[in-house]
Image (tube, rainbow, N blue to C red):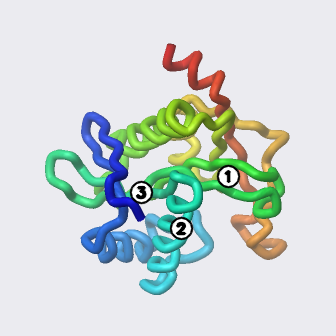
Amino acid sequence: MRNTFKIETERLVLRCWAEAHIDPCVQLCADPVVMRYFPDVLTRDRTLRLIGMFRDCFEKHGVFYAPIELKASGEFIGFAGLDVHDEEALPIGGCVDIGWRLKRSAWGRGFASEAARAWLRFGFETIGYEEIVAFTVPGNIPSQKVMTRIGMTHDERGDFEHPKLPEGHAFKRHLLYRMTNEDWQMRTG
């Protein structure tokens, strides 16, 4: 992975994965409260595979879920970014999705929205995506609030059943949010 990638916001730095991010990310993904809207917590091995997938996405597409550090201290508080899905991955077809995961001590301080806006800017203005989507389970109200706060719109007709989860699973149904490049341009002037 090219180690020169960096996005800075007023309070945050999003950069390439480094060894110093690994253990805090393992702790993040093993926290049952953080992972309450996911099928289960992740083991160290599964978290390492996840980070490997993030790195692969960056190599293939130039976007990825990046570590979030506080600019003032360098503390790892989670990750956020963009992921590219091919036509067969989800019922909604090929898409670019935005997402985030933050540790509990970072909740309620606007960091998810700040990181997400930086990634929307990068995706629309640097890469030139026509649309970016986000999805979550119906019970994940905090993420839905972030999606709305950053200007995404719930597309009820696009809600879907996640293909990687079995029938009857509590998290099978997902809500779909969308933002187009045109929406972004209108919001940012």
Residue at horizontal 78%, vertical 59%? 90
The residue pinned by badge 3 equals 66
Disc 1: CA contacts within 10 A as few (<14), some (14-19) or many (>=20): some
Q: Tell which of 154 and 47 is nearer to you.
A: 47
Give residue 131's quadrant in the image: top right
The residue pinned by badge 1 equals 138
Cα–Cα span, label 1 and label 2: 29 Å
The residue pinned by badge 2 equals 56
Give the amino acid type for the residue marked by disc 1 in the picture: Pro
Disc 3: CA contacts within 10 A as few (<14), some (14-19) or many (>=20): many
Q: Is residue 101 left or right of residue 73?
A: right
Q: Is residue 94 left or right of residue 112?
A: right
Q: Residue 162 at x, y = what percent?
A: 76, 63
Residue at horizontal 26%, vertical 34%? 10
- Going from the N terminus, do you reach mark 3 or mark 2 first? 2
Residue at the limit of the structure toward the top, as seen here: 189
Foreground disc of the pair 1, 3: 3
- Going from the N terminus, do you reach mark 1 or mark 2 first? 2
Residue at horizontal 38%, vertical 69%? 28
Q: Tell which of 3 and 12 is nearer to you.
A: 3
Quadrant where the N terminus sits is bottom left
Give the amino acid type for the residue marked by disc 2 in the picture: Asp
